[in-house]
Structure formats: C-alpha cells, structure tokens
Image (cartoon, grey):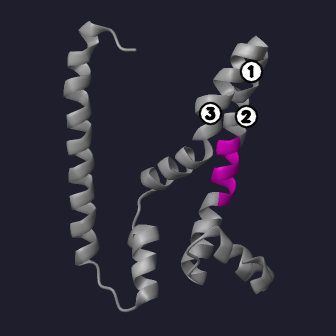
Amino acid sequence: MVAEEHLTGLYVTIPVYFCFLGLATYWAYRRMGRMSHEGVNDKLSAHYLGGRDFGPLMTAGTMFASLFSGYTVVGVPNEAFALGWQSLRWIPSLAGINFGYFGTGFRLRKASQIRNHQSPVDFITDRYQSQMLR
C-alpha cells in the first residue's frame, strides 16, 4: 500500500499521465489522417511502420523495449535475489546484444526498404522463398 502522505503525488501523477496518453493518441490520429493511403496494405504499413519515417532513436527505443520488457523487469531482479553477484553477467551481455544490433540492424533496415518487408516474418518468408514459414 501507499503511505497516506504519498497519495497526493499519485492524485497528481496519474491524471497527468493519462492526459499525456490522450495527447499522444490525438497526435497520432491526426498524423495518420495526413498520410496518403492508396490501399489496405498502405494503411497497414502506415500503422505498423509509421510510414517508415521513424528515426534511429525511436527504432532503438522500440528494439530496447521489445528485448528488455518482461524478463528484465521481473526475471533479472528475481535472479539477482536468488543468485546474488552471479546475476551481474547481464551487464556484459547487454554490450553483446547492442553490438549485434549495430552489426545487423543497418543491413536489415536497408533490406526491408528495398524488399518492402513490414515485419520479421516478411523477411524470413522472402529470404527462404517459402510461404509455409509464414
């Protein structure tokens, strides 16, 4: 439970957070309306890929959030509690993961623009020329 003296902060923070979410939703709605859509595939591409105009900071943030979502929030602290100092192995592994992204990310981005991939499934299907992998 939250202590009584900290409730004021919650009463302020939560409405501000939801106002921010509402503004972000409205901004995205207006932005989607300005994009030209010629077909269903264009609408899906605009929705999932943001019209392919995300910058490197947004792309890196998305990859980071996808990779470090659940296990980092729940699993790693639990492991640190159970195993102690042994869980520090996650720090150098982060460097290895980032190195892997920098080694392949730019090439995958270029290939996705040239071959019009919209998801990792599109890349795998195109790479191995097999619809069964879908």
Q: Please count the marks in the image.
A: 3
Residue visible at 68% across and 54% down?
Answer: 103
The Cα–Cα distance between marks 1 and 2, rounded to whole angstroms, is: 11 Å
Query: Magenta stretch mostly in which secondary structure?
Result: helix
Tell us which disc is closer to us: 1 or 2.
1
Q: Quadrant of the N terminus?
A: top left
Q: Camera-side residue: 16 or 2?
A: 2
Answer with left or right where residue 109 lies relative to residue 54.
Answer: right
Task: Say few, some or many: other residues with alpha carbon within 10 Å of mark 1 (under 14 / 14 to 19 / 20 or more).
Answer: some
The Cα–Cα distance between marks 1 and 3, rounded to whole angstroms, is: 12 Å
Q: Camera-side residue: 98 or 88?
A: 88
Residue 121 lies, in percent from the top left, at 67, 72
Relative to 126, is 97 above or below? above
Residue 24 lies, in percent from the top left, at 26, 53
The Cα–Cα distance between marks 3 and 2, rounded to whole angstroms, is: 12 Å
Residue visible at 28% across and 63% down?
Answer: 28
Q: Which amino acid does label 2 sit on?
A: Ser
Q: Name the residue under label 2.
A: 93
Answer with left or right where residue 16 lies relative to residue 107.
Answer: left
| Mark nearer the N terminus (3 vs 2) | 3
Residue 100 lies, in percent from the top left, at 70, 49
| Labelled disc at residue 87 | 1
| Mark nearer the N terminus (1 vs 2) | 1
Q: Camera-side residue: 132 or 59?
A: 132
Answer with left or right where residue 28 lies relative to residue 48.
Answer: left
For the residues bearing labels 3 and 2, Cβ distance under 8 angstroms? no
Relative to 15, is 42 above or below? below
Q: Which amino acid does label 1 sit on?
A: Ser
Secondary structure under tag 2 reads helix
Check residue 16 for magenta coloring: no
Residue 16 lies, in percent from the top left, at 20, 36
